[in-house]
Image: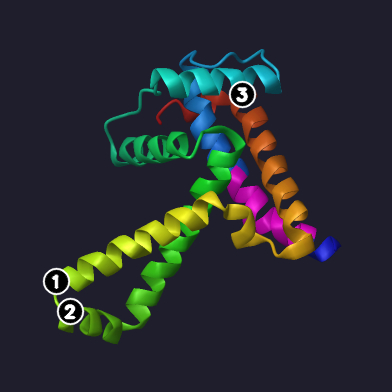
């Protein structure tokens, strides 16, 4: 059980902490979120931001582009804790798909032999499958009795990243 928890912290908790820190820091820095608020207030503010469509201002660099894209996807997943875990799961599944495609060049040939329409349909179906996997992220990471451990690790990561983002937002002035 301890081994599962440590694995969950490394594979899910730590990346979710980094994502929440990177996404929340600009929102705290720009005054879109209150630095003095508690968890309940943070969730309410994130919900209000999502409804208003308010977004942080990011630099016009490649980092800013990636930050805007991540923030947009995060809000599409609902923002907050669930959105961070879903965003990380989506990134992992997309990376796994990329590795599979690079490792199986014959897969491309088979899809291209069936025509461009088949390739587009296969791509869209894969994207839908990855989105469903991201939304049900807890099933991707955990199995059976270990699901609560993975949820706890992700939540711990989100809360840790939010706390660091709230108190140390100045480190990301370039972002």
Answer few, some or many: residues within 10 Å of disc 1's Cα (few below 14, many 20 plus, some between 14 and 19): few
Q: Quadrant of residue 122?
A: bottom left
- The magenta segment is 5-16
The residues tagged by marks 3 and 1 sit, at their Cα atoms, a distance apart of 44 Å
Q: Residue at x 61, y 15 (%)?
A: 35
Identify the residue under disc 2: 112
Residues at badges 1 and 2 in contact (C-beta under 8 Å)? yes
Q: Earlier in the sequence, mark 3 or mark 1?
A: 3
Q: Residue at x 75, y 46 (%)?
A: 152
Q: Residue at x 52, y 33 (%)?
A: 79
Compared with 44, 134 (above or below) is: below
Please say whether residue 13 is one of the residues in the magenta stretch: yes
* Residue 115: image location, x then y, percent: 14, 77
* Residue 69: image location, x then y, percent: 35, 40
Identify the residue under disc 1: 116
Compared with 144, 113 (above or below) is: below
Q: Earlier in the sequence, mark 2 or mark 3?
A: 3
Q: Nearer the viewer, residue 112 or 72?
A: 112
The residues tagged by marks 2 and 3 sit, at their Cα atoms, a distance apart of 46 Å
Identify the residue under disc 3: 43
Q: Is 140 situated left or right of 132 in this image? A: right
Q: Residue at x 57, y 53 (%)?
A: 136
């Amino acid at each position: 059980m301890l081994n599962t928890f440590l694995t969950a912290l490394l594979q899910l908790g730590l990346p979710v902490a980094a994502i929440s820190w990177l996404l929340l820091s600009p929102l705290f820095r720009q005054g879109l979120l209150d630095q003095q608020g508690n968890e309940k207030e943070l969730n309410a503010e994130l919900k209000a931001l999502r409804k208003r469509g308010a977004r942080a201002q990011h630099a016009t660099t490649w980092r800013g582009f990636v930050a805007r894209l991540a923030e947009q996807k995060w809000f599409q997943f609902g923002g907050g804790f669930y959105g961070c875990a879903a965003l990380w799961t989506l990134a992992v599944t997309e990376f796994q798909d990329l590795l599979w495609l690079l490792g199986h060049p014959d897969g491309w040939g088979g899809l291209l032999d069936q025509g461009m329409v088949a390739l587009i349909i296969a791509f869209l179906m894969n994207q839908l499958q990855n989105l469903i996997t991201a939304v049900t992220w807890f099933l991707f990471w955990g199995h059976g009795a270990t699901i609560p451990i993975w949820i706890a690790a992700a939540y711990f990561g989100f809360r840790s990243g939010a706390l660091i983002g709230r108190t140390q937002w100045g480190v990301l002035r370039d972002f």
